[in-house]
Amino acid sequence: MRQRTGQSFHQFKREANVATFPNDFSRHVNFENRPYFWPAGNFHVVTDLGEAMEALKNPLLSADRSSFFISRMPNMDLSLIEDFFSVVSKMMVMSDGEDHSRKRQAAQLGFEDHVLDKFRSKVAISVDSLLESALSKKDVNFCDDVAKRLPSTVLADLFCIPEQDRVEFYNNSIAMTAFFGGGTGYENEDGIKVNKAASTLKTYFSELIAKRKQMPGEDYISSLLKAQDRFNLSDGEIISQAIMMLVAGQVTTTDQMCNNMFLLASSLEDQIALKNNPSLISNALEEYNRFDPAVTFIFRVARQATQIGDQHIKAGDTVFISNHCVNRTGLDHGEQINIHRKGIQHMAYGYGAHFCIGAKLARMEMNLLFKTLITKYPHLKVKMASRDHYSLSFSGFDQLILEKVQ
Ligand code: HEM
């Protein structure tokens, strides 16, 4: 078994340079483009695109990652997080095989093209009003005023959550995500906090289910309820899929928007090219996602012994796939950004059975946002920025202040 030592990934992320982080991190994680075991984290690391695809198609590598989470909680009384585990264990993102595909088919009904097409004008209105307000100020607080607000507004709209419940709804989803991302260590107080968030959301959604059963609407819960009998979904499973959408759709989108904005605001050349040719925007966003993915690692746990390339994986071992590394595999000048690049391939939205179900929605949000920004507003440059690496799995910004270039 190939092993390697060195500075912990967490430590490296925390100390990284804001601007050069994506390439620095990729170089730090990569080890001769081969899979290896990282004793400090107690997991294997995959850095090659082909091997990552092989791993994500391997049925012996399970998406049920509870054993890994539990291994990270030696100091925590697990009875404190019973509600959290009861919600998470029913999520499709933690399930495999037929159980996963049953839940996924039901969940997908809310993301079909005709549903998203109807939703587009609502997203466009939110984009316009958030940008107008953020850009009316001298300095633009992109992270707080745009990137955190747009995904939470879109998700609350998706579930038709009333205005007065939205702040609490947002705070609980953030508490769940921070816990989910694979921290370095968890204490009882973290458990109490996340369990409260899980049980509050569980109660909220069970009341919402009761209301929607009485009076169905055009929202996401109503679409799951319509599919309830066909896919044999219990109310508990519907609640878990709903909470999963919040957890998976909020921080990821906020982080990716900030990562993309930072890259765009750092390049006047890209801004000019996009202003001259807005049809290039979606390609540019894919390139930015490739270069600085918000999900830094996708991970799985081996249900039985298996192999990735020549690396032996024992039953129970955890495998981390580095998105920064795989997104640079086999590319000409993969360490450079090229918004004109053709046939961009990346794993920012995952790969295989668990490929991001919200990718279309996230792409729609980002395309509308960046298109409006590029076509209606002046050029921007970074005034102040700091990265946020609160967990091993996610990577974004906690501060991104921009100034207008006249
Ligand atoms: C830019 C924003 C986003 C990024 C970068 C992103 C990234 C990812 C990645 C990498 C995965 C694969 C995880 C794995 O294989 O373990 C994934 C899965 C998933 N994402 Fe996203 N995501 C984004 C937005 C969203 C949105 C907006 C939603 C929903 C509203 C969403 C819902 C999901 C769900 C439910 C899964 C699990 C799918 C399954 O298990 O079959 N994501 N996402």
Image (spheres, rainbow, N blue to C red):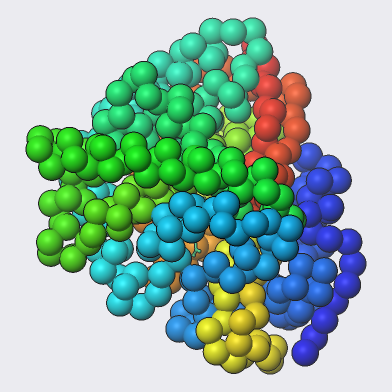
Q: Quadrant of the N terminus?
A: bottom right
- Counting from the top left corner in percent of width and height, residue 241 is at 34, 53
User: Is 55 on the left or on the right of 117, as rendered?
Assistant: right
Figure label count: 0
Q: Which residue is at a point 26% across and 31% down the rendered structure image?
A: 160
For ligand 1, which image quadrant applies? bottom left
- Name the image quarter holding residue 185: bottom right
Q: Which residue is at a point 36% across and 78% down the rendered structure image?
A: 97
- Counting from the top left corner in percent of width and height, residue 120 is at 28, 34
User: Is 390 on the left or on the right of 279, as rendered?
Assistant: right
Residue 395 seen in this snapshot: no
Nearer to us in this view, 310 or 38: 38
Using the image, determine if residue 49 lies above or below residue 285.
below
Q: Quadrant of the C terminus?
A: top right
User: Is 371 on the left or on the right of 289, as rendered?
Assistant: left
Using the image, determine if residue 219 lies above or below residue 37.
above
Residue 188 seen in this snapshot: yes
Using the image, determine if residue 6 lies above or below residue 182.
below
- Name the image quarter holding residue 357: bottom left
Q: Which residue is at a point 37% across and 24% down the rendered structure image?
A: 165
Q: Which residue is at a point 76% across and 68% down the rendered structure image?
A: 41
- Counting from the top left corner in percent of width and height, residue 388 is at 70, 39
Outermost residue on the right side: it is 6
Nearer to us in this view, 161 or 275: 161
- Counting from the top left corner in percent of width and height, residue 178 is at 60, 45
Using the image, determine if residue 255 lies above or below residue 95.
above
User: Is 158 on the left or on the right of 347, as rendered?
Assistant: left
